[in-house]
Image (cartoon, rainbow, N blue to C red):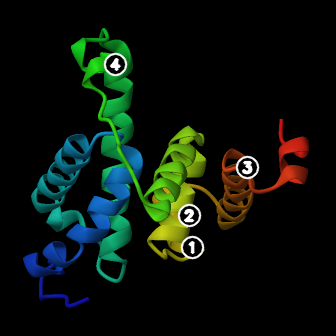
Amino acid sequence: MTTYPQGTVAHHELVDLIPALRAFARSLCRKPDDADDLVQETLMKALANLDKFERGTRLKSWLFTIMRNTFLTRRRTADREPVGIEDCVSQMPQIAADQEGTLRLSDVKRALSRLPQHHREIIVLVVMLGERYEDAAVICGCAVGTVKSRLFRARQRLQMELGESAELANSMP
């Protein structure tokens, strides 16, 4: 990461991280439009607070932490709001897949969405985005050991959701 005299970050470094932010946002939000809004809000907050970015830390982890906190704040707010027309069954997308790979990907996405939030978050950070355990721990605000155990349980539960492990299905609560 390039640093400048006042410890600021070049805007192109933020732009380079947008694909990773979008991937993380899509793991948090069920709707692509909500994920895009989350990325935009994260970038706006980051730009407004670049002076608070600490020199020597990872920009990606800092942005993921902003995104996670923004998502959790939105979620708490949404829990207090009444359900509207957006939850109508007729508005749900229909997937007409005719290839094995597309069907399998759809199964994995559904299984991932059924995981608890903290398991889904760890799977996306460590497995899909390739974050180190230490960075995932910083982003999630927990210990490295907690990240490892969550990842282990998340993988087990995902296998169970996909019906890939009969012995796991019998051992999970």
Question: Residue at label 1?
Answer: 134
- Helix, strand or loop at disc 1? helix
Between marks 1 and 4 in the image, the one whose residue lies nearer the viewer = 4
Image height of 129 relative to 155, above or below:
below
Determine which residue is flagged by label 4: 89
Q: Which of marks 1 and 3 is nearer the N terminus?
A: 1
Q: What residue is drawn where x is 16% and y is 66%?
A: 50
- The dot on residue 137 is 2
Q: Which of marks 4 and 2 is in front?
A: 4
How would you rate the neighbour count of disc 2 (Cα within 10 Å): few for under 14, some for 14-19, many for 20 or more? many
Q: Which of 66 and 27 is in front in this view?
A: 27
Residue 12, given in percent of the width and then of the height, sits at 10, 80
Camera-side mark, 1 or 3: 3
First in sequence: mark 3 vs mark 4: 4
Task: Classify residue 24 as left or right of residue 50.
Answer: right
Query: Residue at (38%, 19%) from the top-left corner?
Result: 79
